Image (spheres, rainbow, N blue to C red):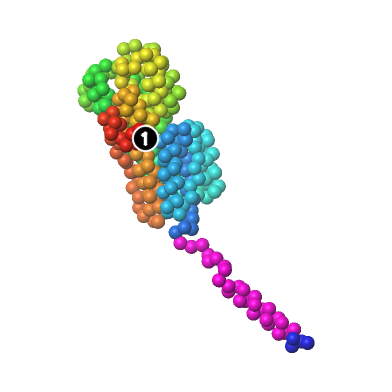
Amino acid sequence: MAKAMVGVLAAALSLGLLAGCGGDEAPPETGPDKPGGVIGLSVLTMTNPFFKEIADVVTAEAASHGYEVIVTSAEFDPARQRTQVKDFLVRKVSAMILTPADSKAVGTAIKEANEAGIPVFTADIASLAEDAKVVSHIATDNYAGGRQAAKAIIQALGNKGKVAIIDHPIVESVILRTKGFRDELKEANSPIEIVGAWPGKGSKDEAFMAAQDILTAHQDLAGIFAINDPSALGACAAIEKEKRTGKIAVVGFDGQLEGKVAIKEGKIYADPIQFPDEIARRTVQTIMKYLDGETVPPEILIPTRLYYKADADADPALKAD
């Protein structure tokens, strides 16, 4: 009886071992498909297609390196952005990308990330906060783009007349654009007069209201420099409402689809266009190099180019189906 029981146990043990070595068990997850980590992204807003494209391309590029991206939007609110950064810290992300809602106020959030040992990268909008360490800033060359905008307004106005700026001076990228615009007019010895700058908060609705105030205050206005396409479109709407279409030249900044359509229609004279897809890709690539132990440059600038109606007429993206 004892010998029979031993035989049964031996057979059972043998079957168990064979089952454990069977070919149906999946191998451990390895290779490039295994997630490499998580990147936290907080963009300025998702209401602007420029930042939506940055978020989409960052997500796709990171995935190609095996990384997941947590996408959040500050919606122009520095406090909300700080809360998003705190959440990234709790999740212990591998790195974070910020497009600051306020270039100075963002310093507190960046310092918290510094203390936690999480590398911070900025895309499109830089931090101006002291003692807040950013590994690398990847953006449009906004200063040069502002100079291009001034060249376009000189062309549009025949180098004469009065212009206004629809501004958003709490973010570094816009500060650089308007500085470039002013510097180009000054260095070109242009007689064009800047009558002032009105806050448009980078949004179509706010810019519409700002433009209404400008048009009321300056009946002899000849041109408007709007710091992005939503601002330019808001200015165009105000000009149309006041029945002054064709009398005021608008120069925008971005090259978003809606802005390009307005250029094609003759509502916007020109845009220095940006390349958000390139900003996004270069940002992720820079993060990957840094995480691999490579030294990365503190700043990477991507040039703009002027885009006119002739460019819009030839643009395949604007061709009718």
What's the magenta region? 5-31
Camera-side residue of 67 and 112: 67
Crowd around label 1: few <14 · some 14–19 · many ≥20 (10 Å): few
Q: Is residue 92 left or right of residue 291?
A: right
Camera-side residue of 130 and 66: 66
Give residue 147's position: percent from left, percent from top: 27, 30
Give residue 295's position: percent from left, percent from top: 35, 52
Camera-side residue of 284 and 245: 245
| Residue 207 placement: quadrant | top left
Label 1 SS:
loop
| Residue 167 placement: quadrant | top left
Q: Is residue 321 left or right of residue 68?
A: left
Give residue 107's position: percent from left, percent from top: 45, 38
Q: Quadrant of the C terminus?
A: top left
**Residue extending furthest toward the left:** 189
Instruction: Name the kind of residue labelled 1 in the image.
Output: Asp
